[in-house]
Image (cartoon, helix red, strand yellow):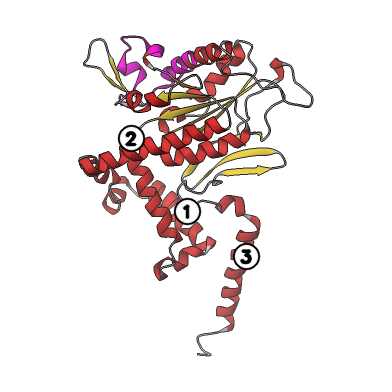
Amino acid sequence: MRRLVTRSFLVVLLGLAGIELALRLGMTDFFEGRFEYGYHPRGGIVEANGEVTLARTGARKFWPQKFPAAHPPQGLRIITVGDSIPRGASLEQSWPWLVGQQLRAQGVATEAISLSIAGYGAERKRLLVEQALNWSPDLLILQVGMSNEFEDERDLARAREFQDWHPRHWPMKSWLVRRFYEFKHEMLFTKWLPDEVRRQAAVNDGDVEALAGQDPARVRAWRRQFEAVTARTLAMAAARDVPVLLVPRVQIEPTHTPVDFDDQGLRTILEPALGNRVVWFDPARAFGVNPDPALFFRDHVHMHPPAHQVMAKAIAREVLALRAAGVVQPAVRTGLARAPEQARAPEQAR
């Protein structure tokens, strides 16, 4: 036994323990929620000294942004929650950001914040809305769709697996081991291995999802989940008296004349919730009756940057109409008010 527990072994053990302690004391924000796949309420959200920073962490891959936690003294604060469709190719090319740009160009002081993350379904969007409501938005834009319920279900199982105390998970309780695990996947597996090697080692979630999507019972369960969770999300906004603009996920059918914007029954599902404070936005109003699919859509769902510009202009017009009707009202807070032209968009985090 003495031969096994050598001085070198103890030095290495103490060194690893020191690194672990340093990570836990100095990098809490970096690791918080990284292995909960978007189900940690504060993962990727750092709030300090009155400022909120949105960062990329684990499944919470926000476009980096910074903004005051408190509502600005004057002007609109609009927060968009959605998945990969409003997320766009970059923050500055996405319609949630561009809506703010459009409104500021028309003299309306606006702060536009995007909480759009690829693969997020109804439940993880609900968690984001819960956080967003703490920042006093004047309007919540909620992008809705039922295409990511499989991802929500799969990632919840992953999060629970990492939380489990089965002996096979004991090494992952160490933040140092977790960081090596992430490095293996984010750098070695994703960036350095050739595609053919990575495909052989990977589990094809697309195939699993396709099979699940052919199971009528699973599809019905996902629809019930979407309906129930979205109702809870809208109830949270109503409790804070925050109006909601619903933007549906639509798929276009280029073979139809005129082009058909198919919301896959979303309007019918959410019709009971619509009213003065929950407003439906029809993307067909943005693009007209016969848009060019090749110009605007790369896969009949996601949009090229020019389409984000079109969406932003149309949504900005909708916001102005809601503002004129008194549904969306710029909140003037106590303290030193700024002139409209002084209000700025949240900065990109550096």
Which one is closest to the eye, mark 1 or mark 2?
A: 2
- Any part of residue 197 in sight: yes
Query: Residue shown at 46%/54% (left/top)?
Result: 182
Residue 140, percent from left and from top: 53, 27
313 or 93, which lies in front? 313
Which of the 4 quarters of the picture holds residue 348? top right
In the rendered structure, does residue 165 fall within the stretch colored magenta? no
Q: Which residue is mark 2?
A: 147
Q: Which residue is mark 3?
A: 21
Residue 152, percent from left and from top: 38, 44
73 or 102, which lies in front? 73
Specify the amino acid type for callout 1.
Answer: Phe
Left or right: residue 118 versus residue 129 is left
Specify the amino acid type for callout 3.
Answer: Leu
Q: How many marks?
A: 3
Q: Which residue is mark 1?
A: 35
Query: Residue shown at 41%/68% (left/top)?
Result: 166
SS for dot 3: helix
Furthest residue to the right?
Answer: 336
- Magenta range: 285-314
Query: What crowding class fits label 3: few (fewer than 14 Cα within 10 Å), some (14-19), or many (20 or more)?
Result: some
Structural distance between the alpha carbons of marks 3 and 2 = 41 Å
Structural distance between the alpha carbons of marks 1 and 3 = 19 Å
Query: What crowding class fits label 1: few (fewer than 14 Cα within 10 Å), some (14-19), or many (20 or more)?
Result: many
Specify the amino acid type for callout 2.
Answer: Ser
Query: Residue shown at 55%/44% (left/top)?
Result: 44
SS for dot 2: loop
Which of the 4 quarters of the picture holds residue 324? top right
Query: What crowding class fits label 2: few (fewer than 14 Cα within 10 Å), some (14-19), or many (20 or more)?
Result: some
Left or right: residue 141 versus residue 196 is right
